[in-house]
Image (cartoon, rainbow, N blue to C red):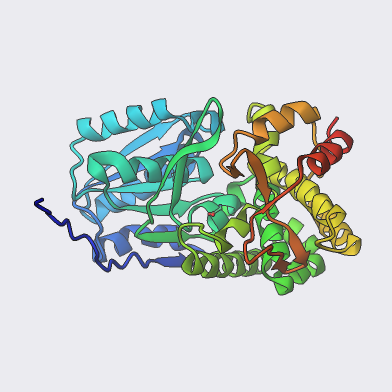
Amino acid sequence: MMKVRINLKKEIDFSYDVLIESGLLGKIPKDLKNNPIGNKYAIITDSNVNRIYGHKIANGMISEGLTVCMLNFQAGEKSKNINIVEYLINKLIDKGLERNSAIIALGGGVVGDVAGFVASIFLRSIPYIQIPTTLMAQVDSSIGGKTAVDLSKGKNLIGTFHHPKKVYIDPLVLSSLSQRELQNGLSEIIKYGVIYNRGLFEYLENNVEEINKRNVECITHIIIKSCQIKSEIVQKDEKEENLRAILNYGHTFGHAEEKCGKYETHLHGEAVTIGMNFAGTLAYRLGFWQKVDLQRQNSLIKSFNLPIKSNFKSNEILKVMYRDKKVADQRIMFVFPEKIGKMATSNGKYKITVPEKELVSLLNEFSS
Ligand code: GLY
């Protein structure tokens, strides 16, 4: 027998910086001039962000002598699909982007996930950077390299791990967000407090009013803390083999809630807080954490005007939950808190299966 070995063991450094500074947006063109990541750039954004920031960044880049084109699509979760990916890739080819070109994802979570996915598959992958313009994207989706699009059967069912080369976070861009969008992002920050950092949870409790009033210092503080927490978790478990799964707290139910509402009833963060109430209640029923902690979580959620009650029927939710990525051997997996700032494990694993009887009984009480 002949054996031809394909030796692929190698060490690759995918490390990158997340830069956070008020007013950073205006400094990006110069930074790209000084630290280029491509010979040409395509800014991928959505119809809303394009109007506010797209041309500002593109013009700044042109002034620095960089070659840049703009591509945009209709804002909203409904655009996070494979047809948009094909449309964008055709445009990239028409605009002459090559293997040494780069993509700039300018926008919220949908833009970041779609543009990151396009970057990961275009010409078998090109580099990209993230410029998140929503609180949700700044504290969660722009960091960690998860890219995805949705299928009609569910959310994020096609995706890759492809880390950005850099993430630029400018807290001042949040001034253009509606209060609902701001609260949407706060949902993931509350989640970080519950799953990993009691100090952040208590900071949120003590600063509800200032945060709701958008005090820039408070908002910047919680962005920095969240990025540090996410970075720590991703560094420990990049490919979600165990610990990273705690970031999915509230998401098993949340994704089903979003899908049942056809992505129109709830924003992602709103569905997640409903899911945190569900997973938290289940955790209490199964003896993982105390009722006082569940109540404390839920009152913090409510103080930011975020929902905890589902809008859908239990059988609809259950059907969609079975299609989620978090199902293994046809059993739905959850992650559960043990106390504020710490998640529970079972046999060293954060993902815990739940007896269907418990799940259905709580679903019947929980859903409309
Ligand atoms: N948003 C969940 C994760 O990045 O793993």
236 relative to 84, above or below: below
Q: Which of 61/340 is in front? A: 340
Q: Which of 69/242 is in front? A: 242
Residue 197, quarter of the rendered image: bottom right
Q: How many marks?
A: 0
Q: Residue furthest bottom?
A: 199
Residue 236 image point, x, y percent = 50, 69
Would residue 361 be visible to someone looking at this image? yes
At 12% from the left and 54% from the top, the residue drawn is 3
Residue 350 image point, x, y percent = 64, 60
- Direction from residue 252 to residue 305 in the image, left or right: right
Residue 302 image point, x, y percent = 83, 51
80 relative to 133, above or below: above
At 24% from the left and 64% from the top, the residue drawn is 9
Residue 311, quarter of the rendered image: top right
Would residue 178 be visible to someone looking at this image? no
- Direction from residue 82 to residue 126 in the image, left or right: left
Residue 199, quarter of the rendered image: bottom right
Q: Which of 200/351 is in front? A: 351
- Direction from residue 309 to residue 152 in the image, left or right: left
Q: Residue furthest front?
A: 1
Residue 56 image point, x, y percent = 39, 47
Quadrant the C terminus occupies: top right
At 25% from the left and 58% from the top, the residue drawn is 37
